[in-house]
Image (cartoon, rainbow, N blue to C red):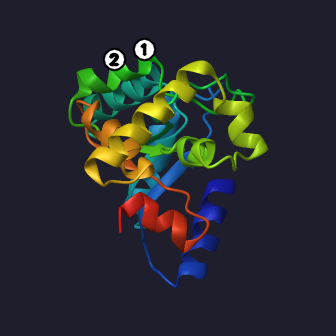
Amino acid sequence: AELESDIETSLKELKKEKKKNLWLHRDDEAQQAEKIVQTMNLFIKKGKIKNYAVSNWRGERIKTANIFAQKEHLSPIVASQIQYNIALHNGLSDDTCLEMTQKEFDFYKQEKTFPVFAYSSQAKGFFEKYLTDSLSSAASRDYLNAQNMSLAKKLQKQALQTGKTVSELALELLLNQSPFPVFPIIGASNTQQLRQTLGI
């Protein structure tokens, strides 16, 4: 009932009859993945949504859900949103969030074509901000470590050689290291950051 209320509110705000894609944020592992699949398919059958995707779900849960969906001829989870970038994270303070670990990476690699929407894809702007002495407290807390400082300097050197921006190179590396489809979510807060990301 809460989900349906949220969908109805969202459709009203968007002035739409159907949501193209519904994202389920933060997994509640006390709920069976199979029941969640059944619930989402009810909304699809009602014509409220076209597809559904998940955010901060472990690969094992996605696999369980989609095996069940295939077995029951139901619509599966179509995409995943996870914290993913080229930086070494100092450790998540929120246990309801999920970052790309080797285990998760191996899951997506095995799936091959399952799309990943990478949030914090630029590590909260760590590389640009570190090189310009403008690190925020959040970026420092999450990413300030020897490995990332060394990587920032390598990116700076490469930027000088290629004419690309550090932010542009960070996303390029992310895409190049991923043997599965990745769609980086960027968090530009002004036009300068957007230009740095796009390299314009």
Q: Amino acid at mark 2?
A: Asp
Q: In percent of the image, x 25 and y 27: which residue is there?
A: 111
Residue 62 position (above or below residue 187): above
Q: Nearer the viewer, residue 5 or 136?
A: 136
Q: Is residue 34 visible?
A: no
Look at the numbered disc 2 and give the secondary structure of its residue. helix
As measured in the structure, the alpha-carbon distance from the residue carrying label 1 to the one carrying label 2 is: 5 Å
Q: Nearer the viewer, residue 89 or 25?
A: 89
Instruction: Determine which residue is flagged by label 1.
Output: 103
In the figure, is residue 27 to the left or right of 168? right
Residue 140 in the image: state x and y as whole percent.
Answer: 72, 36
Q: In percent of the image, x 55 and y 62: which residue is there?
A: 188
Residue 132: assigned label: none
In the figure, is residue 139 to the left or right of 171? right
Q: Amino acid at mark 1?
A: Lys
Mark 2 neighbour class, 10 Å CA radius: few under 14, some 14 to 19, many 20 or more? some
Residue 166 position (above or below residue 8): above
Residue 92 in the image: state x and y as whole percent.
Answer: 68, 27
Residue 35 in the image: state x and y as whole percent.
Answer: 51, 34
For the residues bearing labels 1 and 2, Cβ distance under 8 angstroms: yes
Q: Which picture quadrant has residue 147? A: top right
Q: Which quarter of the image is occupied by the C terminus? A: bottom left
Mark 1 neighbour class, 10 Å CA radius: few under 14, some 14 to 19, many 20 or more? few
Q: Is residue 145 visible?
A: yes
Q: Which quarter of the image is occupied by the N terminus? A: bottom right
Look at the numbered disc 1 and give the secondary structure of its residue. helix
Q: How many marks?
A: 2
Instruction: Determine which residue is flagged by label 2.
Output: 106
Residue 134 in the image: state x and y as whole percent.
Answer: 69, 50
Q: In percent of the image, x 74 and y 47: which residue is there?
A: 136
Residue projecting furthest to the bottom = 15
Q: In percent of the image, x 32 and y 37: which residue is there?
A: 173
